[in-house]
Amino acid sequence: MTDKISVKNLTFYYGDAPAIKNVSLAAQKNTVLALIGPSGCGKSTFLRCINRMNDIIPDTRIEGDIVIDNESIYHPKYNVTSLRRRVGMVFQKSNPFPKSIFENIAYGLRINGVRDRYEIESIVEKSLKSTALWDEVKDRLDESALGLSGGQQQRLCIARTVAVQPEILLMDEPASALDPLSTQKIEDLIQDLKVNYTIVIVTHNMQQAARVSDETAFFYLGDLIEINATEKMFTNPDHEMTENYITGKFG
């Protein structure tokens, strides 16, 4: 298997306080890596390092490196705009634009230079099909996206992200605000999407991590305690602290 993302001795500081401490791990191509751990342990900060969204936060700095396809994304000459095209992000709270369902997806395509109407329509349809949303919305594409249910809005945001054809999908607790049925649809979707994408997902739901991921990384107070194949992690972890967290003794 090929490493799509390789993280090397990564330490990230807010001011003088390290939020992530000397973390090294790899995510392989076309797999799902789940990040678990208590609130405030550095999971979301780590996720945002992969697309350099932390760059916009004042008084932060980073040590170490993240390599995607053998290229350092923190090299001074690395193009951050192209990075964010390659690394899509889905947030905890769905954030559709106050536009039509169609325009939510077409907007990003136009920003990226797609002008042909037929091509835009084709990609919109393909993106909605890839998120199992097409049959639910194909007759109301001109209606506001804000009229969709919470679960549909989140799938629309995923469709909007995949429309511009990234290589990596970052998901920050994408189902935490959803009902069980919508959550299941998102989980099924993650399994379908990994055929074409490398996915890194932050989740507070251990059962979800066990269901959707190939590997799981356990963070605690900024340290990476353990990374392992998900099945091993949840049945026979290497570290006692991992076992204590997974079995609910703390967290």
Image (cartoon, rainbow, N blue to C red):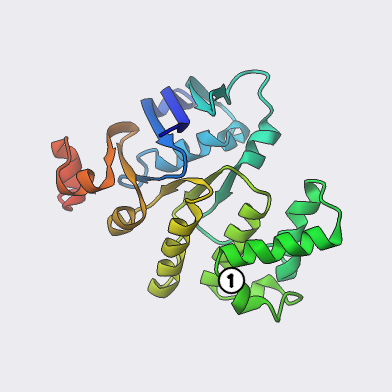
Q: Looking at the rendering, which quadrant does residue 133 occupy?
A: bottom right
* Residue closest to the eye, 99 or 132: 132
Front-most of 91 and 152?
Answer: 152
Residue 8 occupies which quadrant of the picture? top left
Horizontal arrangement in the rendering, residue 142 relative to residue 26 (left or right): right
Q: How many discs mark residues in the rendered view?
A: 1
Residue 79 percent coordinates (x, y): 69, 28
Q: Callout 1, which amino acid?
A: Leu
At x 15% / y 50%, what residue is drawn? 249
Above or below, 2 against 200 in this view is above
Relative to 56, is 16 above or below?
above
Q: Going 41% across and 48% down the picture, which residue do you hit?
A: 202
- Compared across the picture, whether 24 is left or right of 100 comes to left
Can residue 176 be seen here? The reply is no
Graded by Cα atoms within 10 Å as few (under 14), some (14 to 19) or many (20 or more), the crowding at tag 1 reads: some
Q: Is residue 35 above or below residue 80?
A: below
Identify which residue is drawn at 78% across, 59% down: 120
Residue 24, x across and y down, in percent: 37, 26
Q: Residue furthest front?
A: 1
From this view, report whether residue 11 is shown above or below residue 198: above
**Based on the displayed image, in which of its 4 quarters is residue 158 positioned?**
bottom right
Q: Position of residue 1 (x, y in %)?
A: 40, 34
Nearer to us in this view, 114 or 82: 114
Residue 201 seen anywhere in this rendered image of the structure: yes
Q: Secondary structure at mark 1?
A: loop
Left or right of 90? Residue 37 is left
The residue that disc 1 covers is 133
